[in-house]
Amino acid sequence: MKQYDEKIEQLIKQAKDNRLSNPRLVLEAARKLRDIAKADTDNALLGFADYAMANAHFELNDAESVSHYAGRALPNLLAENEWDLAGSTYNVLALINFRTGSITEGMEYLAQAMKLVEEHQLNLLGTVVYMNAADISVQLEDPSEALHNLLIAETYLDNCPEDDHQP
């Protein structure tokens, strides 16, 4: 995404920093970002805001809202070439579908994330996506596929710059 003014950057930071710890703060920031993005016709920011909302609802275990906001985020993210965020959105959709027992649909979303990872050399996201694929393979009692996905994840991790290895 492009560089924004300080107010917008603070809201983006709030959404990112609280992603795993405080989904309510993420939702608050994302709503404000959506309003700004709509007023400015900024599809990249709108896609980010909807992605942040999907992610927050994932933490709240609200599958319907994850699907709703991810479905709104993807067209904007893809149109704006925000590949990493689009791949992360597919990954969240995959995880929520696995969580709710929709394994086939989850695998389809994971495949979409893998496609973006491979097409755009998204090494850090590739590590995460293939680790998730390995986890699902274990749950499906397919250890050879799990090992295969772990090895691919390791390859992506090895290709990440050292500073990407930090939390």
Image (tube, rainbow, N blue to C red):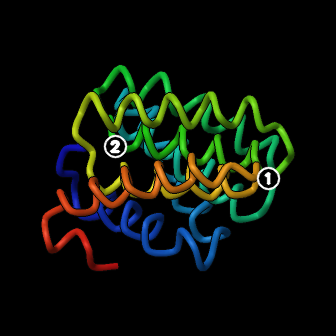
The answer, for residue 46, to whether it is visible in the render is no
Mark 2: secondary structure? helix
Q: Position of residue 77 (x, y in %)?
A: 40, 31
**Residue 62 in the figure: left or right of residue 156:** right
Q: Nearer the viewer, residue 25 or 99?
A: 99
Write the residue at 21% across / 62% down.
Answer: 158
Residue 23 occupies quadrant = bottom right
- Quadrant where the N terminus is found in the figure: top left
Residue 59 occupies quadrant = bottom right
- Structural crowding at the residue carrying mark 1, measured as other residues with C-alpha within 10 Å and reported as few (<14), some (14–19) or many (≥20): some
76 lies above or below 60: above
Q: Position of residue 37 (x, y in %)?
A: 41, 38
Q: Amino acid at mark 1?
A: Arg
Which residue is the site of mark 1? 99
Write the residue at 69% across / 37% down.
Answer: 106
Mark 1: secondary structure? helix
- Structural distance between the alpha carbons of marks 2 and 1: 22 Å
Q: Nearer the viewer, residue 134 or 124?
A: 134
Write the residue at 50% across / 28% down.
Answer: 112
Q: Position of residue 21 (x, y in %)?
A: 59, 79
Write the residue at 34% across / 43% down.
Answer: 84
Q: Position of residue 13 (x, y in %)?
A: 37, 68
> Decide: marks 2, 1 in contact (CB < 8 A)?
no
- Quadrant where the C terminus is found in the figure: bottom left
Which residue is the site of mark 2? 84
